[in-house]
Amino acid sequence: MSRVLLIDPDRGALAALRAALGQAGFRDVSAVTSGSFALTMLERNRPDLIVSRVGVPDIDGYELCSIVRKDPAMTGVLLLLLVSPGDAAPKAMLEAKPDQTLAGDLPVTTIVSEVASLLGNRAPRREPTPSPAAPIEVTHGLHGSLEIMDLPDVTQAIALGNKTGQLLVTLPSGRGAIVFDRGRVVHAEFFGLIGETAFAALLVAAHGAARGEAHGNFVFKPLENGETNAAKTIHRDLKQLLLSAAAGIDEGRPDAAVAPLS
């Protein structure tokens, strides 16, 4: 099955394209609103096709194309760039070119048709041979909507990237923070709680928000020096933390509930 990665800062357009691809039979479709978060996902799962808007604020489509084309691990990945009216032209002649470019306010059906054409004309995907080349280094802050990527997936992406910094989560019920030190969760705060209790409460609140209309947003702010001075209030690894939080959600424990701000 072909794997597709969508990148578009417009959450509505992203959801519409993802739904249309699903109806067309593409089941393995990931979607993000940030180019930098897309790079983090590429470290985990190599797609067959990347569909990116040019006008992505943090890493635009042209820059993303250049990064992917220079990475040996991404050899064979197809790129479809979507150019909207008003998008800036590339700063220089493109050395790394996409496989296809679509320009204008196009209907979703046209994009889906082009995706099908690109994937239909390629050979079956072969996983690349492990390369000694260094992984893509993400230096930009990650941000996006929890409607597109849920909080457990966000935390795992940061952990897999061995990042150090602070993940700020904004939910309808309030705001929380999770601190990472070289990929390990070391501290969390939410509604006056700290440590593992705060981490679990934040995941429970995010899970509850996902069942409503307002999902919330996140932003990860890496530390430039790669070191954090936050107090270490969490000692278990992320897998254990997520399993514990999931058990609390499944059991509906009353001590995991968090009241909204007044």
Image (cartoon, grey):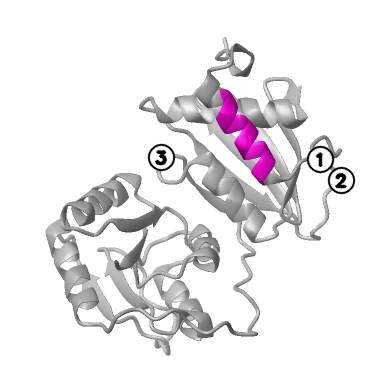
Mark 3 belongs to which amino acid? Answer: Glu
Spatial distance from mark 1 to mark 3, Cα to Cα? 29 Å
Q: Which residue is mark 1?
A: 235
Q: What main secondary structure does the magenta stretch of the protein show?
A: helix
| Residue 101 visible in image | yes
Secondary structure of residue under mark 2: loop
* Marks 1, 2: nearer the viewer: 1
Badge 2 density bin: few <14, some 14–19, many ≥20, Cα 10 Å: few
Mark 2 belongs to which amino acid? Answer: Asn
Q: Is residue 196 above or below residue 115?
A: above
Residue at (26%, 79%) from the top-left corner?
Answer: 100
Q: Is residue 188 above or below residue 70?
A: above
Q: Which residue is mark 2?
A: 229
Query: Residue 59 at x, y = what percent?
Result: 49, 65
Q: Earlier in the sequence, mark 3 or mark 2?
A: 3
Q: State the extent of the magenta-drawn residues as a range.
A: 239-248
Q: Can you tell which quarter of the image residue 92 is in?
A: bottom left
Query: Residue 126 at x, y = what percent?
Result: 39, 81
Spatial distance from mark 1 to mark 2, Cα to Cα? 15 Å
Q: Earlier in the sequence, mark 1 or mark 3?
A: 3
Secondary structure of residue under mark 3: loop
Q: Can you tell which quarter of the image residue 193 is in?
A: top right
Is residue 221 rendered to the left or right of residue 83?
Answer: right
* Marks 3, 2: nearer the viewer: 3
Mark 1 belongs to which amino acid? Answer: His
Q: Which residue is mark 3?
A: 147
